[in-house]
Image: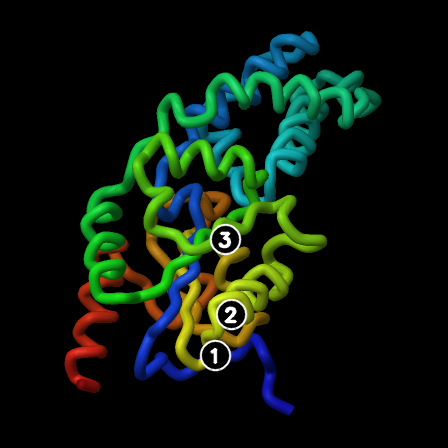
Amino acid sequence: MTDPRASRPAPLCVRLITFDLDGTLVDTASEIAEAANRTLHEIGLPRRPLPDVTRLIGHGTRELMRGLLAQAVEAGAARAEALDLDAIMRRFESHYHDTTGTDSQLYPGCLEGLTRLRDAGIQMACVTNKEHRFAVRVLQSTGLSGFFRLVVGGDSLAQKKPHPAVIEYCLEALAVPQSQAAHLGDSSIDVDTARRAGVAAWAVPYGYNGGQPIEASHPDIVFPGVDAVADHVLSVAAKAA
């Protein structure tokens, strides 16, 4: 039986690209870290440096705060282990409501690449582990919301990345076969999700992959940016025409 995580042939004709959000399209680390650090301060724990928070981005905000509590325990704050995570998340969500979209920065080439893909008729969806309401606010604040037919957040379905259901949902909703779809992300989570869903696994080398090079996750292609994705997709389409 073929391993569903094995590398897939490059799509000859790409009709759909699903995009990760944080670390792929938009640099949101500072506003996430500020919300997390306001939460830590409120519960009497020391703020964490930006790199410590950034390494935890990608699994959703609950896992982010769980990881920061674990860091606090390792740093000697033993009481952090007994704190109520549900109560902490209510505090975090209040702070993140205030910081979301306040310091979101588009990565170079993102707007240009998305514009060219849209103008060429490529369908696009945003698939993120960030809660849907926060993802929508980031997209709105950066002017990206009009590019995506669908926005699938970490709380939109019963599962989140790396479960393949998040991409399978987009394939079904937009009537695109696996062979004509790709997923672009910045982390091993994104590569794993694409493999499980049977679509091409594309990646960018920047972003939040826990401090590890994305090449270690063996994506099918590593692009320097979204503008390079547009170059590739439109070049392939022109050759096939």
Q: Which is more toward the observer, 35 or 205?
A: 35
Measured along the vertical axis of the image, is residue 52 above or below residue 163? Answer: above
Name the side, left or right, on which 159 lies relative to 176.
right
Q: Quadrant of residue 51?
A: top left
Residue topped by disc 1: 177
Q: Secondary structure at mark 1?
A: loop
Real-space CA distance between mark 2 and mark 1, rounded to the nearest whole angstrom: 6 Å
In this rendering, the answer to whether 123 lies above or below 126 is: below
Q: Position of residue 146 (x, y in %)?
A: 34, 46
Q: Is residue 9 left or right of residue 72?
A: left
Q: Which residue is mark 2?
A: 171
**Which amino acid does the dot numbered 1 rest on?**
Pro
Q: Residues within 10 Å of mark 2 (few under 14, many from 20)?
A: many
Give the x, y percent position of residue 22.
43, 42
Q: Amino acid at mark 3?
A: Val
Residue at which label 3 appears: 127
- Asked if residue 193 shows in the view, the reply is no
Circle 2 or circle 3, nearest the eye: 2
Indicate the amino acid at tag 2.
Leu
